[in-house]
Image (cartoon, grey):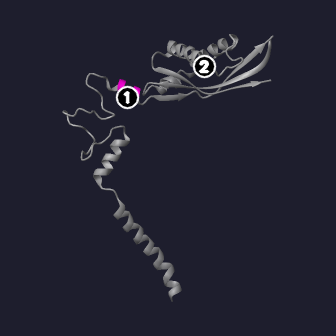
Amino acid sequence: MIRKFVPIVLPIMGLGLGTGAGLFLKPDQASTAEASVAGQGEIAAPGEAGGEHGEGSAIPSEGAVAKGQKPDAAGDEENPEFVKLTNQFVIPILQDGRVVSLVILSLSLQVKTGTSEEVYALEPKLRDAFLQVLFDHANAGGFRGSFTDGSNLLYLRRALLERAQGLVGSIITDVLISDIARQDS
C-alpha cells in the first residue's frame, strides 16, 4: 500500500514546497521596479520608485540628460552600436610580382545609435573603399615586418575612418580591427 502511496505523495509535496518557497522568496514590487530601471542605465535612489531624482537634486542619474543637451547625443556617447562587417578582408602582399603572404582582417564599425541599418545598406560601398585603403597600405609596406605595431595600426584605423566618414558621414565614429593575421607562404 505504501509503495503505491509514495509515488503520488512525493510529487505533490515537491510541488507544494516549491510553490511555497517561490512565494516566500519572491521580491517585492518596489525592488523589482528599481532593478528594471537600474538595468536600463539609470540608478534608482533608495526609496524612490522609478529612479527619478527630484529637480533640486544635485546629482543627475547616469542615464539622465543634462539641460540643453540633445537626448540623442547623450545616448550615442553612452550606448554606441557596433556593426560587424560580414566578411573578412583578404589582402595579398606582393614582392617581385609574386604573392608572398596574405593578410586577413575583420573589421567592425562603431556607429551612432539607431544608424546600423543605414551602414548595413551601404556595406558593399564601404567594403570597396576599405579594400582600396588596405591595398594602398599593403603597397606602402604597412603589412611587412612588425605590422601589428601600435602606431602602424593607428595610422591604418585613421585612414579607414576617414574613408568611411567620407562615404557615410559622421554616423561612423570609429573603425575597430577585431582580427588581424598574416600568413606567409
Residue 37, disc: none
Type of residue at label 1? Gly
The stretch in magenta equals 73-77
Residue that mark 1 sits on: 75
Q: Quadrant of residue 75?
A: top left
Residue 10 point in image, percent of width and height: 47, 77
- Whether residue 125 sits left or right of residue 46 in the image: it is right
- Disc 2 vs disc 1: which is toward the camera? 2
Per the image, is 122 magenta?
Answer: no
- Whether residue 137 sits left or right of residue 99 in the image: it is left
For the residues labelled 2 and 1, the Cα–Cα distance comes to 28 Å
In the displayed structure, would residue 72 be above or below residue 140? below
As drawn, the residue found furthest toward the bottom would be: 1
* Residue depicted at 42% across the width and 31% down the height: 79
* Residue depicted at 41% across the width and 71% down the height: 17
Residue 171 point in image, percent of width and height: 45, 20
- Dot 1 surroundings within 10 Å: few (below 14), some, or many (20 or more)? some
Which of 63 and 108 lies nearest the eye of the viewer? Answer: 63
* Residue depicted at 20% across the width and 36% down the height: 54
Residue that mark 2 sits on: 153
Per the image, is 75 magenta?
Answer: yes
Q: Mark 2 touching mark 1, by CB under 8 A?
A: no
As drawn, the residue found furthest toward the left would be: 56
Residue 141 point in image, percent of width and height: 70, 12
Which of 142 and 73 lies nearest the eye of the viewer? Answer: 142
Q: Earlier in the sequence, mark 2 or mark 1?
A: 1
- Image quadrant in which the C terminus is located: top right
| Secondary structure that dominates the magenta span | helix
Type of residue at label 2? Leu
Judged from the image, the secondary structure of the residue bearing numbered disc 2 is helix
